Image (cartoon, grey):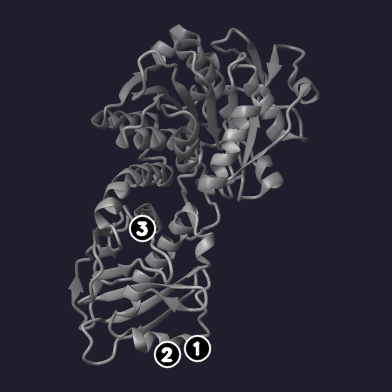
Amino acid sequence: MTLMPTISFAKFSAPKKGVAIVLAGEGGTLGDAAAACDPARVLTRAFSVAEFSGKSGSAVEVLAPEGSPLDRLVAVGAGKTEELNDYAWLKLGGTIAAQVRKAGEVTVVVDLAGTRVAAADAARLAAGIVLRSYSFDKYKTRKDEADGNGKETSAKPAKITIQCADPTAAKKVFAETQAVTDGVMLARDLVNEPANVLGPLEFAARAKELEKLGVKVEVLTEREMKKLGMGALLGVAQGSTRPPRLVVMQWNGGKAKDKPVAFVGKGVVFDSGGVSIKPASGMEDMKGDMGGAAAVTGLMHALAARKAKVNAVGIIGCVENMVDGNAQRPGDIVTSMSGQTIEVLNTDAEGRLVLADALWYCNDRFQPKFMVDLATLTGAIMVALGQNYAGLFSNDDDLAANLTSAGQVSQERVWRMPMGPEYDKMIDSKNADMKNIGGRHGGSITAAQFLKRFVKDTPWAHLDIAGTAMGAQANEINQSWGSGFGVRLLDQLVRDHYEG
């Protein structure tokens, strides 16, 4: 996997070797500690030549002159200090990571003129460095690079020292922040894995590893799901030679009497579309159709690793949707765990079938405070929202508001979409209680209306993350095809509103 940088924190002192990176506020101003770096005077002279004004995300660098202990000196623009919120510090860290390149040792001087940078902000900057540094290179065999003399050298992770006013406090905050970044990177790894490596059994095994953090993990087999009557989920899986699994993860960090919060993820490890087969072009991306389950798994890692004071349940339905003589057919009618019958008009609308049984099981067994499901469910949501927002559907205004505010803080943003009886009528069936598609129009809405039939009166939200979990636009803290979307959003939701 990626050679992630090692991060340490220290008090301000003159950087001795490697690359020094300093922050510059609006107007190209340097803090005292940054200005004291040798050769900062050379760098500031370059500001006017490079028309560098300290704008957020901008950068300028110079090679250190002869006699300096450093190789390079870089200034990164921090912009207006009053606009440096939590996410801005993460982005700043990502911008810094882009400047590290192949440097062996890097010193980042977190100092701004006229203000004392909080320890938490220095920790967020470090987290941004880590998130931006991720890349999925597990299957690349040529990892050695040639040095200037043509000799092969083994790649080594950069050693990054964050200099700040209170390194002890920053280190403590970073330890908690790192629990969340590790959860994001776990989700990215899962989405990026090829489907021949990550099947339902392998996904369940990866989730089982969370037991090391104190998460209780149960794995329901096909036989157990048959006993529970999960005909909707099993109907999707029947065309694959790889058996399905339902994984139940529990983190009990709150009071014993407290009801849990619950998260449910669609885990279709590969989606061919089944008999309603997808076009060949782009089908390789369907290895990422388990982005919702990846986010739930990454979230459970984050909550357990930071010892969140909450009781949380994560449930993922892991299946493969394949074309086979045993695959379900358009027109088949299946009976869900709820007892409701479903006419399957399109086998490529399979994620909602998996979630129907997973949601019902979650609600029936745990009776949670709320349920949030995540799924790469519809292409229609990308038509509506592009790839910058996930679609939010909910039966509860308070939960929807809490998710929206958490999205603004984390910048994993959601946009609430409409629901209503007019849309619900579109999935009524002549032959069963409902059909699994509602026609051409409002596809993401009718999918949500379908899921709503399996949550009873429990506060619930559905996040359609088809445009944000895979193939999303690269940004300052993510350059990966699998983004890990949802982990930071839901951790923020729990942190702000549900942690006791």
> How many residues crowd around disc 1 within 10 Å: few (fewer than 14), some, or many (20 or more)?
few
Q: Is residue 70 above or below residue 482?
A: below
The image quarter in which residue 122 lies: bottom left
Mark 1–mark 3 distance (CA, rounded to whole Å): 28 Å
N-terminal-most mark, 1 or 3:
1
Left or right: residue 437 versus residue 261 is right
| Residue linked to disc 1 | 48
- Identify the residue at horizontal 34%, vertical 56% (top origin): 137
The front one of 267 and 313 is 313
Q: Is residue 256 above or below residue 85?
A: above
Percent of width and height locating residue 189? 38, 45
The front one of 150 and 386 is 386
- Identify the residue at horizontal 20%, vertical 77% (top origin): 16
Amino acid type, callout 2: Arg
The image quarter in which residue 115 lies: bottom left
| Residue linked to disc 2 | 45
Q: CB of mark 1 within 8 Å of CB of mark 2?
A: yes
**Is label 1 in a helix, a strand or a loop?**
helix
Amino acid type, callout 3: Ala
> How many residues crowd around disc 3 within 10 Å: few (fewer than 14), some, or many (20 or more)?
many
Is residue 346 visible from the viewing direction of this image?
no
Q: Which numbered dot is residue 235?
A: none
- Identify the residue at horizontal 37%, vertical 77% (top origin): 74
> How many residues crowd around disc 2 within 10 Å: few (fewer than 14), some, or many (20 or more)?
few
Q: Which numbered dot is residue 122?
A: 3
Percent of width and height locating residue 314? 42, 26
Amino acid type, callout 1: Ser
